[in-house]
Image: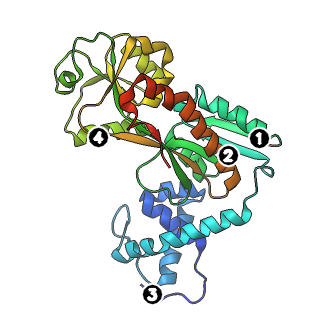
């Protein structure tokens, strides 16, 4: 590798693309996230190496992997890049009164009550603002935030870091088992491989399905299934009809009010496991706006979901709740 270049300043774009590639391990994904071509991304990464005079990547591997020096460089710039993003956001951010357009993405889990109430609340407190509300998967919302197609999103917290976005954990939502009322087989029997009820599961491309599958694998549990669906309400309808059982969360169970008289929610045997929901924003979203949304989201979750579920299932009190 040549000696460090003295002709160019260190490129902030190159550092951002370096972080992105280190997270995705894919030139194509890095290009998609940045809105640049693959060749432009590759040029920025090469220029960064030339500027530093060290090999950050093993170019003989496909896909490229970071070298020891590359991993060290990544560790050393992470805090600095976070500080730059924060400083930039604070310098350019407006206020609630100054915000004229706000784009919010939420997962379907909040669609029935929480998102409509949030929309009404924000319209009253931000009378001069136009709004766009988008419902999608966590993966899609995060991608849109990275592409600056959304300003705020409520998502299932992904594994790994969101170094290019700001995030605040909001809710711990444990996984629970849901069975038909009057099912002949007990839950431990079914999980042990006995019983007649098949496992009805979320579609494998959803983040919640990946989290459930990861935990089942850790427990050494293999569950044969015959039905896969991306919609929680459909899963609850199938369970209520006696077609099987499923693993879901109290937040999702709370949405299935019409089916609840025919459903029984149970703690998953053994050590509890769960997911968290986070409020995620692009770096340039005004902090006053984030605080306003965060306040209403927490208020709505507490009053509409958490308190009623604690009353209906007291065993959830230590597992299901807001996070500081």
Say left or right for 297 vs 212: right
Pointer 3 residue: 2
Report the disc number at residue 292: 2
Question: Which mark is first along the chain, 2 or 4?
Answer: 4
| Helix, strand or loop for disc 1 | helix
Can residue 230 be seen in this snapshot? no
Image coordinates of residue 178 in percent, x first then y, are 35, 22
Residue underneath mark 4:
215
Q: How far apart in space, not on screen, are marks 4 and 1 (Cα)?
A: 41 Å
Tag 4: Cα neighbours inside 10 Å, few (<14), some, or many (≥20)? some
The foreground one among 107 and 50 is 107
Above or below, comparing residue 156 to residue 99 in the picture? above
N-terminal of the pair, mark 3 or mark 2, is: 3
CB contact under 8 Å: marks 1 and 3: no
Q: Position of residue 274 (x, y in %)?
A: 37, 39
- Residue drawn at x 40%, y 74% is 70
């Amino acid at each position: 590798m040549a000696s460090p270049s003295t002709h160019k300043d260190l490129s902030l774009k190159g550092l951002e693309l370096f972080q992105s590639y280190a997270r995705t391990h894919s030139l194509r994904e890095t290009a998609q996230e940045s809105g640049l071509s693959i060749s432009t991304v590759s040029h920025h990464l090469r220029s960064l190496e030339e500027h530093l005079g060290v090999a950050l990547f093993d170019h003989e591997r496909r896909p490229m992997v970071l070298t020891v020096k590359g991993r060290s460089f990544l560790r050393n710039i992470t805090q600095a890049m976070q500080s730059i993003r924060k400083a930039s956001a604070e310098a350019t951010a407006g206020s609630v009164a100054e915000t004229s357009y706000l784009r919010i993405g939420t997962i379907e889990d909040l669609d029935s009550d929480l998102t409509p109430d949030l929309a009404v609340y924000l319209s009253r407190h931000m009378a001069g603002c136009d709004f766009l509300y988008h419902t999608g998967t966590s993966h899609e919302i995060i991608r849109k935030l990275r592409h600056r197609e959304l300003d705020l999103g409520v998502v299932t917290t992904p594994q790994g870091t969101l170094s290019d976005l700001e995030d605040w954990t909001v809710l711990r939502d444990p996984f629970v088992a849901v069975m038909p009322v009057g099912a002949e087989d007990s839950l431990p029997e079914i999980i042990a491989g006995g019983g007649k009820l098949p496992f009805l599961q979320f579609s494998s491309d959803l983040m919640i399905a990946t989290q459930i599958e990861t935990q089942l694998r850790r427990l050494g549990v293999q569950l044969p299934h015959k039905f896969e669906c991306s919609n929680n309400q459909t899963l609850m309808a199938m369970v209520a009809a006696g077609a099987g059982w499923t693993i879901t969360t109290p937040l999702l169970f709370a949405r299935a009010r019409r089916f609840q008289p025919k459903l029984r929610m149970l703690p998953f045997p053994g050590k509890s496991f769960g997911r968290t929901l986070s409020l995620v924003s692009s770096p340039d979203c005004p902090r006053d706006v984030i605080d306003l949304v965060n306040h209403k989201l927490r208020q709505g979750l507490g009053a509409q979901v958490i308190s009623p579920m604690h009353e209906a299932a007291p065993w959830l009190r230590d597992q299901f709740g807001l996070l500081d």
